[in-house]
Image: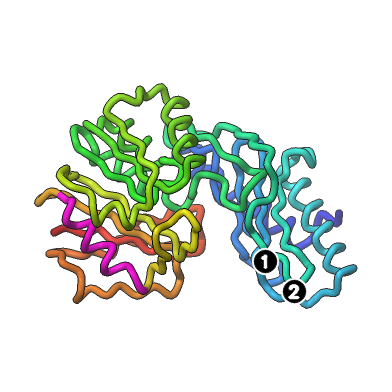
């Protein structure tokens, strides 16, 4: 590996810039590189003493032989900068063959490693999926929810591995309700609670289609609701398909019915082309807080959009 390669130099520069922030914020998982240079369409994150690399789906100008050479040189640059063995590098590489679906499940190893964020511990899986179990770009929103959760009832929809629920519980929430369609993710959420020595009493985990459940759920109102739906969902387990642009008004309005009068809804999406249809949403205030929720280690300031909504 040529130590003066552009990727090597950029990674060294980024690491030097980000280290004070990482130390101050008590983080062991953070982003170092996100397609900073066009010729290196990679996303590089640190998780403890491991590095997770995902290649963006893009039309590469190289033929197969030169592509593999480029990938090997990129890999060697990453290993050199982070000074890690190959076993600590998790590389999610796109398939070159036509007709193969990309970025789905990679393995079935189920190897979980612990990482720390603001004094809390979360289990991540760097091997089996493209997504690791913890969305790093929502770190500041999670922190905000923890600061606002004391003695409150929290609802976490499309909860994934339950990180928002853990933050809320750690912030002294009276109760949390974690809703997701996947048993795998709900069990993962419970493991995240256990990693932080949080008893499961007063914390409910519900396996169901969140968009249908919120329409039919009776009774209980919540002080804070976290709503971070997928961009699109075509799961066979779901009652209906979902598209965040087409369906967000209906989803938000049904969700607001379960919000206490002085409560707040955090709605977010990673869909780059998303447009909020404010006029059709039954809310008193809809504040775009996106920029204030994007961490310093994310140079891409449109990694997600986030709104604070009140009835």
Residue 115 image position (x, y, % from top left): 54, 34
Q: Nearer the viewer, residue 194 or 306?
A: 194
Q: Residue furthest right?
A: 65
Task: Give the number of the disc on residue 60.
Answer: 2
Q: Is residue 26 left or right of residue 81?
A: left
Q: Quadrant of the C terminus?
A: bottom left
Q: Residue furthest left?
A: 261
In three-dimensional space, the C-alpha distance between marks 1 and 2, rounded to whole angstroms, equals: 9 Å
Q: Which element carries disc 1, helix, strand or loop?
A: loop
Q: Quadrant of the N terminus?
A: bottom right
Magenta segment: 246-259
Among the 4 quarters of the image, the one containing residue 266: bottom left
Q: Is residue 156 left or right of residue 120?
A: left
Q: Which residue lies at the image location 21% right of the left edge and 34% below the top edge?
A: 150
Among the 4 quarters of the image, the one containing residue 231: bottom left
Residue 13 falls inside the magenta stretch:
no
Mark 1 surroundings: few (<14), some (14-19) or many (≥20) residues within 10 A? some
Discs 1, 2 touching: Cβ within 8 Å: yes
Q: Give the residue at mark 1.
A: 41
Q: Which residue lies at the image location 36% right of the left edge and 37% below the top edge?
A: 205
Q: Which element carries disc 2, helix, strand or loop?
A: loop
Q: Which residue lies at the image location 66% right of the left edge and 56% below the top edge?
A: 54
């Amino acid at each position: 590996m040529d130590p003066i390669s552009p990727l090597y130099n950029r990674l060294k520069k980024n690491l030097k810039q980000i280290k004070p922030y990482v130390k101050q914020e008590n983080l062991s998982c953070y982003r170092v590189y996100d397609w900073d240079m066009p010729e290196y369409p990679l996303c590089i994150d640190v998780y403890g003493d491991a590095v997770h690399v995902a290649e963006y789906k893009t039309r590469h100008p190289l033929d197969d032989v030169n592509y593999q050479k480029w990938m090997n040189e990129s890999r060697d640059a990453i290993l050199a900068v982070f000074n890690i063995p190959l076993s600590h590098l998790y590389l999610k590489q796109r398939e070159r063959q036509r007709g193969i679906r990309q970025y789905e499940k990679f393995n079935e190893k189920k190897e979980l490693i612990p990482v720390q964020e603001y004094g809390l511990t979360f289990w991540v899986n760097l091997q089996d999926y493209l997504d690791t179990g913890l969305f790093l770009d929502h770190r500041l929103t999670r922190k905000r929810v923890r600061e606002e959760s004391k003695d409150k009832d929290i609802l976490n929809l499309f909860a994934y591995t339950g990180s928002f629920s853990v933050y809320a519980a750690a912030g002294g929430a009276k109760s949390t309700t974690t809703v997701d369609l996947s048993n795998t993710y709900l069990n993962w959420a419970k493991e995240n609670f256990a990693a932080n020595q949080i008893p499961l009493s007063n914390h409910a985990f519900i396996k169901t289609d969140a968009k249908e459940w919120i329409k039919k759920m009776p009774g209980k109102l919540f002080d804070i609701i976290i709503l971070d739906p997928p961009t699109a969902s075509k799961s066979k387990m779901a009652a209906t398909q979902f598209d965040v642009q087409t369906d967000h008004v209906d989803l938000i309005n049904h969700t607001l019915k379960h919000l206490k009068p002085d409560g707040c809804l955090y709605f977010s999406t990673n869909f780059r082309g998303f447009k909020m249809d404010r006029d059709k949403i039954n809310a008193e205030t809809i504040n775009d807080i996106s920029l204030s929720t994007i961490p310093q280690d994310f140079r891409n300031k449109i990694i997600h959009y986030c709104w604070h909504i009140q009835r």
